[in-house]
Amino acid sequence: MPGIDEYLKSHARRFEDELCELLRIPSVSADPARREEVRRAADWVAGQFGRLGFAAETISTSGHPLVYAESPAVPGAPTALVYGHYDVQPADPLDQWTSPPFEPTRRQGNIYARGATDDKGQMLTHIKSVEAWMAVEGRLPMNVKFIIEGEEEVGSHALEEFIVEHSDRLACDCVVVSDGAQFAPGQPAINYGLRGIAYYELRLEGPDRDLHSGSFGGSVTNPANALAAMLAALIDQRGKVQIPGFYDDVAPLSQRERKELASLPFDEQEYFEQIGVEGAAGEEGYSVLERRWARPTFDISGLSSGYQGDGAKTVLPAAATAKFSFRLVPDQDPAKITAALRSQLEELRPPGIEMKLTDWHGSAAVQVPLESPYIEAAARAIEHAFGTPPVFTREGGSIPIVTTFHDSLKADTLLLGWGQDDDNTHSPNEKFSLADFHRGTQASARLWHELSRIAT
Ligand code: BES
Ligand code: MN
Ligand code: MN
C-alpha cells in the first residue's frame, strides 16, 4: 500500500490542522451550557464523512447527537464498525493548564487540548485512514461503518438505545475502537479487557438549614461527618471493599494470566514517580498492573458540603454530597452492586440523616477473546505502522458501550488504543503525541487491508 502510506505522509500536517479544528469545539457532554457546542462537534464529524461521499447522518437523540456513516458497499467483503466519541470531559481545573484547553497547542511533538487523545485524536485516525483509501484507491477494500457518539463521558445512554433498536443496520463482523492507551511509548498494545463501572451520587440531608456549629454541634448529626464516616466504611485499610457480597462474582486471575502480566516490562518505581506519589496503595497480594486492570476498586470523585470559601466559617451544614464509583471486573453485575450498596448504606446511615442515592450509570467489564483472526489482523496492522508487534494488555478504564456491541451485535471489539498512559486524560494538560496520531492513522489504513482478507 505504498500509495496510501505516501498519501498519509504528505497530508499529515493537514490532518493535524483538522484535529485542531475539532479540538477547538468545547464539546463537554456533562455541561448543559455546552449543548450547542456538542452539536457543533457532531456536525463537524458528519461533515468529514460528507466530504468522503459516505452516506452520513447526524441523528438527534434524547441526549447528544449520534453521527452514523457508511462507506460504499463492497459486497462479499467483511464489515467493521468503528466506534468513537467526540464528547470530552470538563476541562477544570482551568488554572492548571499550560495552554488553554480549547486552544490546541503543539509542544514537544504533542498536541495539547481537552479531547486530544480522549477521544477526538484517536477517533480521527480512522476517518483519515478511510480518506486516504478513498483518495488513492477510490474505494475501501471492505465495508466500514462508523458510529461516533457525544455521550461517552456521561454513560452512552442514547447510543445504547440506538444500538438495541438498530442492530440490523449496525451489523458487522467486528467493532474497532481506539479510545485507550499503548503499553508504553514505542510499545503498542491490543487491549483484551476493560473494567466495568458503577457510578453513584449520594446525598445526605440533616437539619433543614445550615446551623451554627457551636450552638448546635454535638446535638444533631452533621451530614458532612456522616458522609465521611459512611464513605470511609465502604473500604478498609487493605483496599478491600466492605460491602457484603461485593466480591462474590469476581473472576479470579488465572495463574497463566498473572504470569503473562508479570512478564510485561513494567517498572513500578517509574510509574509512581511519573504520577508524583511516593509509593503503592491498594489491595494486598496483587501487583500494580493487576490492581489497575483486574481487580475492582472504590474511588470518590467529588465531595461537597459546607463552607468552601476563603478563611474559616463555623457552620454545621444542612447537607453533604459525594460522587463515587466502583470499577468492576468480570463477572460482577452492576445491578447487583447497586442493590448491595444501597442496603449497606442503609445499614451505615446514622439517625437524623435522610439519604438519597442516585445511580448515574453502570456497565459490566469487557473481555475480548484473543484467539481470533481479527486480533491477528490488527496485530499485523500495528506492527506495520509502529515497527514492533503489540503486547496484549488489559485496561483499568471503561467503555460501557463495548458490552452492548457484544450483547446486541454479537461482535467482538478490537481495542486498539493509540494513546499513552501519561496523556493526562480527564486531567489538566491532556495531550496526544503527533507521532502516535500519525502511526495510529497508518495502522488503521493497514487494518482495512488486513481485515479485508479474512473470509466471512
Ligand atoms: N477512553 C476512556 C476509557 C479508557 C481510559 C479506556 C483509559 C482505556 C484506557 C473513556 O473515554 C472514559 O473515560 N470512560 C469513562 C466511562 C464512564 C464515564 C462511563 C471512564 O472510564 O471513566
Ligand atoms: Mn474515551
Ligand atoms: Mn474519557
Image: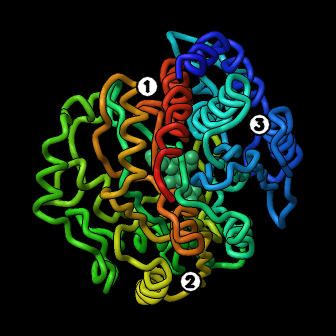
Quarter-wise, where is residue 275 in the image? top left
Q: What residue is pinned by disc 2? A: 353
Task: Residue type at mark 2: give it.
Answer: Ile
The mark found on residue 374 in the picture is none
Residue 175 relative to residue 259: left or right:
right
Q: Earlier in the sequence, mark 1 or mark 2?
A: 2
Image check: 209 left or right of 65?
left
For the residue carrying disc 1, how many other residues have a C-alpha within 10 Å: few (<14), some (14-19), or many (20+)?
many
Of label 3 and label 2, which has the lower sequence position? 3
The kind of residue on which mark 3 rests is Pro
Please identify the quarter of the rendering in which residue 311 is found.
top right
Q: Is residue 408 above or below residue 184?
A: below
Name the element at disc 2: loop
Find residue 94 and report its horizontal and vertical position in percent: 65, 31
**Residue at left 84%, top 64%?**
61
> From mark 1 to mark 3, how far is it between C-alphas?
31 Å
Tell whether 146 sits left or right of 361: right
- Pick out the residue farthest to the front: 76
Amino acid at pointer 1: Ala
Query: Any mark on residue 26, and which?
Result: 3
Which secondary structure, mark 3?
loop
Front: mark 1 or 2: 1
Q: Secondary structure at mark 1?
A: helix
Q: At 80% from the left edge and 39% from the top edge, which residue is drawn?
A: 49
Q: Which dot, 1 or 3, sits closer to the camera?
A: 1
Q: CA distance from mark 3 to mark 2?
A: 39 Å
Q: Which mark is residue 385?
A: 1
Q: How many discs mark residues in the rendered view? A: 3
Q: Nearer the viewer, residue 53 or 284?
A: 53
Above or below 392: residue 96: above
- Residue at image position (33%, 79%) is 246
The span from disc 1 to disc 2 (Cα, nearest Å) is: 58 Å
